[in-house]
Image (cartoon, rainbow, N blue to C red):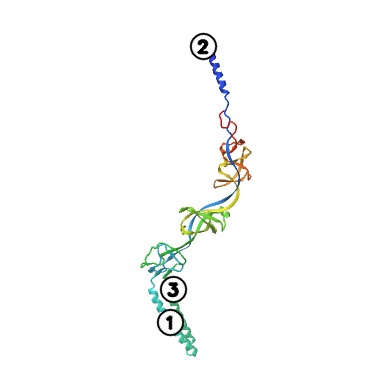
Amino acid sequence: MRPFPLLLAACSLALSLSACGGKKEQKPRAVPLVEATAISRTSFTDDLEAVGTALANEQVVLSAPVTERIEALNFADGGYVRQGQVVARMSVAQEQAELAAAQAQAKQAQQQLDRIQALKARGFATAASLDQQLAIANAAKASADQSRAAIADRVVRAPFSGFVSLRTISAGAIIPAGTAIATVSDISRIKLDFTVPETRLSTIREGMPIKAVSAAWPGQPFNGTIATIDPVIDPATRAVRVRAILPNPGRRLKPGMLLTVSVLSRQRQSLAVPELSVVGDGEDRFVFVLEGRTAKRVKVDTGVRQNGLVEITGGLAAGQKVVTEGVVKLTDGATVRLAGDKAAPGAGKAG
């Protein structure tokens, strides 16, 4: 046998098959299907976030003015008291006895003064004796007034309407001066104090609306307004203290609560596109604008992001169509088709 002719024939057959395989027709690339929408203007706000502490509208700690025994407590734990209502009454037996003695002295001094005035009118009393008796009568009245004031101090009243704290003392106890009897809090509305950095001071003003959220009521925001801005900036923190007023229906907010505050500092109308429309390349941002059925890559300037939208501050005009779905499949100048368009020939078939 001659192996060389057989080897040559085999190589020729392999080359022929390889040539036939190289002429195989390639599958045409499918035209990407995308969604697009015309951009329009949307309302955007610059929110300032802070953390604040809730305070009562009015709050006072009622304390014992003197060391004395408690005779009666006229409030229940967490109860409501009205302005002027007696909260506690202390023992006044000694003061009442002193008042009775002072009143008797005052009456006697007044009677003596009346007699001397009558004698003076008839010329039987001197002016010096009249002046002396007048001073005695006035001193007796002052002593009686002092006893009345001491009795009044031992009756503790609510200075305004509100809710009292839990009771920590009982009737019959002897308490020293300055001991807290009850705390009265007016929580019909809440004062909310928070701090704002010095750099954001120009973005807030009195009367601006705020929204506060409490961890106790996560799904129920509380709306209010800025009432006062502290005229002094803290030199240690470079922040200013701001006070807002919040209505408190149902008394859901309690003094001491921690709330997250959002200040709606500036509202405006700007062009907006969905977040999925914007692609990033380093520090630059781009969108794909449709010109007919051609996607053109356009650089844009962006602002804030809110509710799934991105603010467009430059690079686009209202009414332009922007690709919102299928952005990842596009390149600059790519041909696209929209829902409802006929598929390109061979787009869904193998070659």
Amino acid marked by disc 3: Ala
Tell me if residue 56 comes above or below residue 305 in the rendering: below
- Does 315 sit above or below residue 166? above
Q: Confirm or deny contact between disc 3 and disc 1 (CB under 8 A).
A: no
- Identify the residue position indicated by label 2 in the image: 3
Tell me the residue at 42%/79% (across/down). 103
- What is the x, y in percent for residue 167? 39, 63
C-alpha separation, residue under disc 1 versus residue under disc 2: 156 Å
Q: Which of 276 and 291 lies nearest the eye of the viewer?
A: 291
Q: Is residue 188 above or below residue 10?
A: below
Image depth: mark 1 or mark 2 in front: 2
Mark 3 and mark 1 lie on one chain; the one further toward the N terminus is 1
Horizontal side of residue 312 vs 139, given as left or right? right
Residue corresponding to mark 3: 149
> Which residue is tagged 1?
107
State the CA–CA distance, disc 3 to disc 1.
Answer: 19 Å
Q: Which amino acid, by three-letter code, is at mark 2? A: Pro
Quadrant for the C terminus, please: top right
The secondary element bearing badge 3 is classed as helix
Q: Is residue 117 visible?
A: yes
Residue 198 image-quadrant placement: bottom right
